[in-house]
Image: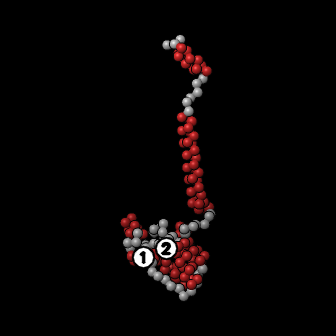
């Protein structure tokens, strides 16, 4: 299964190659091309519909083409795709309770990293300092140096 996914995402599956689409209206053409870069291939996960050669990406491109040709605007196409595939199909999912962790995750990880770095840096510098001796220890050390204790 993994080999099939890799082959389709790496461009080895030529059946899904992007077919050129020409609209009679330049606005529709621009909308279509923008949507292909805005929507994610659900198989390859890290490629847009424009970049993916997966068979499913080809199907999704044809669906976007059909919707744009029928006069659907950007939000209607996006709403249709999200209703079928969820927020995962969007490269920039909306901020809502279900996606808070997705949006805040990088900042939380950065904060944890900075905290760990700070704790490691301060712990290392504190242990490098010589321990301070108490008054009793100093007097005993002085007697030992003078040879009064053995």
Which quadrant is the N terminus positioned in? bottom left
Q: Is residue 17 left or right of residue 132?
A: left
Query: Image point 57% across, 36% down: which residue?
Result: 126
Instruction: Give coordinates of residue 132: x percent, y percent.
Output: 58, 27
Q: Residue furthest top?
A: 148
**How far is mark 1 from mark 2, CA to CA?**
10 Å
The correct choice, above or below, for 102 with respect to 20 in the image is above
Name the one closer to the observer, 48 or 1. 48
Instruction: Give coordinates of residue 124: x percent, y percent.
Output: 54, 38
Instruction: Give coordinates of residue 35: x percent, y percent.
Output: 55, 75
Disc 1 element = helix
Q: Earlier in the sequence, mark 1 or mark 2?
A: 1
Which image quadrant for residue 70? bottom right
Query: Image point 49% across, 74% down: which residue?
Result: 50
Q: Is residue 75 left or right of residue 147?
A: right
Instruction: Give coordinates of residue 33: x percent, y percent.
Output: 53, 78
Name the one closer to the observer, 64 or 25. 25
Query: Image point 45% across, 69% down: which residue?
Result: 43
Which image quadrant for residue 133? top right
Q: Do the numbered discs 1 and 2 sit on residues whose CB atoms are within 8 Å?
A: no
Residue on which disc 1 sits = 16
Residue on which disc 2 sits = 49
Name the one closer to the observer, 53 or 99. 53
Task: Report the number of discs.
Answer: 2
């Amino acid at each position: 299964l993994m080999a099939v996914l890799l082959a389709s995402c790496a461009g080895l599956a030529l059946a899904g190659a992007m077919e050129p689409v020409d609209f009679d209206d330049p606005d529709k053409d621009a909308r279509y091309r923008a949507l292909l870069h805005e929507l994610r291939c659900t198989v390859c996960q890290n490629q847009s519909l424009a970049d993916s050669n997966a068979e499913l990406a080809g199907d999704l491109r044809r669906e976007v083409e059909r919707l744009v040709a029928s006069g659907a605007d950007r939000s209607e196409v996006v709403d249709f795709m999200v209703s079928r595939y969820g927020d995962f199909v969007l490269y920039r999912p909306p901020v809502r309770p279900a996606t808070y962790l997705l949006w805040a995750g990088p900042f939380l990880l950065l904060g944890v990293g900075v905290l760990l770095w700070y704790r490691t840096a301060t712990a290392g510098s504190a242990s490098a300092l010589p321990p301070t001796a108490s008054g009793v220890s100093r007097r005993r050390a002085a007697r030992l140096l003078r040879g009064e204790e053995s």
